[in-house]
Amino acid sequence: MRRPLATLTALALSLWPIAAPATQGHAHGHGEDAVVGTIAKVEGDGLEVVDPDGKSVSVRLTRTTMYLKGTEEAKKADLKPGLNVAVETADGKAGLEARVVRIGSPDGAVWACPMHPEVTGTGPGKCPKCGMFLEKKKA
Ligand SMILES: [Zn+2]
């Protein structure tokens, strides 16, 4: 006799999300991801970002979402279509949730990795070497 129950259990376990309680902030580690691109639309709690490949990603803005402009604190109202953003995301109950939204400025500033100054960009992004977010540098 086969054991469909055991198979099901194994499947359920493998699909079970790593249920780390959503303690704010210090949850750096696996499962963390980022969406980098241009804001296409801000509607209610939904933020739509188009990445450099033209793929659009919807991220949910929550009450705990932080907004940063460079190193300064920003507001949800600062999100405008056309701005570059790097969104630190987490898997929430209702899909992708924004943890931190880093807003880029269209002023031609240079962004660089805190660990790898040679890694630069023209807006928010992630360092391909270490995965840290690029920080805005003074020109
Ligand atoms: Zn780096």
Image: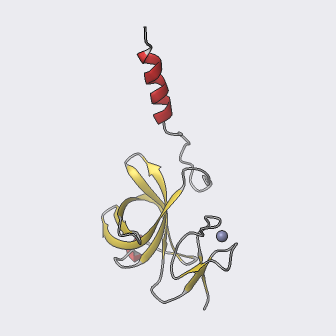
Q: Residue furthest top?
A: 1
**Residue 12 in which image quadrant:** top left
**Residue 130 in which image quadrant:** bottom right
State the residue in front, 98 or 12.
12
Q: Residue furthest right?
A: 115
Q: How far across and how far down the image is residue 54, in percent?
A: 35, 69
State the residue in front, 4 or 86.
4
**Residue at 59 percent of width and 74 percent of height:** 134
Q: Is residue 23 left or right of residue 9?
A: right
Give the image quadrant in which the ligand numbered 1 is located.
bottom right
Q: How far across and how far down the image is residue 76, in percent?
A: 41, 70
**Residue at 45 percent of width and 86 percent of height:** 106
Q: Is residue 92 left or right of residue 25?
A: left
In the rendered image, the vertical position of residue 14 relative to residue 112, given as above or below: above
**Residue at 41 percent of width and 72 percent of height:** 52
In the rendered image, the vertical position of residue 132 relative to residue 135, given as above or below: above
